[in-house]
Image (tube, rainbow, N blue to C red):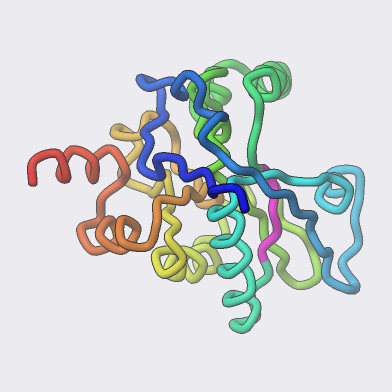
Amino acid sequence: MAEYKKPDYLVLVNRDHKVPDNWLDTVEFVEAKNTIPEGVKLNENTRYLADQTFKLEKKTMEAFLALQAALKEEGITILIDSTYRSIQDQKDIWDLFERLRGIDYVRQYAAVPGTSEHHTGLAIDVCAVKDGRIINDNDEMIAEEELFSRIHKRLPEFGLILRGPKGKEDIIGYAAEPWHFRYVGVEAAKEMAEHDFVLEEYLDWKSRQ
């Protein structure tokens, strides 16, 4: 049996740190598709959620699926919205958001190609199903504070973190994104939750231990 490739789950990718060279050589990917709940109707803005095959690093996908199952027991349904992206994929997204919403918006919510966590396969964007309707619009998800707060509380036990919480915008360099999760492993995720750290703060703290 081939040895499982284990990437650096604490790799820092942000505006100042590009995805490492040859990163993909360290990552084992798996694929998954969403199961749309019965009775939920799709439209031109949500059809991709059923049609697309999503790709994530193996342990990241396992963590997400475990989180998804645990939340379902609480009556909360989340779906995969976005996972691994190539640099070209990110460029296409940047260009689309700039065309639709303008450069100021895209700088708040999108990473310059080459600096997105989605290049690592360790990051996942989710959307939610509420009252039989898929909520995947950014502004609508931001407004669902109570729902996403319940989701966020469960992240650390599965090794996931909320990458862009409110109040940390100056540190992460982006607007808060309640839908953007990152896999770091259970131990790190729990320590970050305990100290209210984002990844940048956590890595700085660990370097001084």
Q: Nearer the viewer, residue 32 or 23?
A: 23
Residue at 58% across / 69% down in the picture? Answer: 66
Q: Which residues are magenta?
A: 78-82
Q: Nearer the viewer, residue 169 or 209?
A: 209
Q: Quadrant of residue 45?
A: top right
Query: Residue 68 appears at what percent x and percent y?
Result: 62, 68
Outermost residue toward the bottom?
A: 73
**Is residue 152 found left or right of 12 in the rendered image?**
right
Can the viewer see residue 97 in this picture? yes
Residue at 63% across / 65% down in the picture? Answer: 65
**Is residue 51 found left or right of 146 in the rendered image?**
right
Q: Quick check: is 185 in the magenta stretch?
A: no
Majority secondary structure in the magenta region: strand
Query: Residue 90 appears at what percent x and percent y?
Result: 64, 23
Can the viewer see residue 101 in this picture? no
Residue at 54% across / 49% down in the picture? Answer: 4
**Is residue 86 found left or right of 25 in the rendered image?**
right
Q: How many marks?
A: 0
Q: Is residue 154 above or below residue 30?
A: below
Q: Is residue 154 above or below residue 202?
A: below
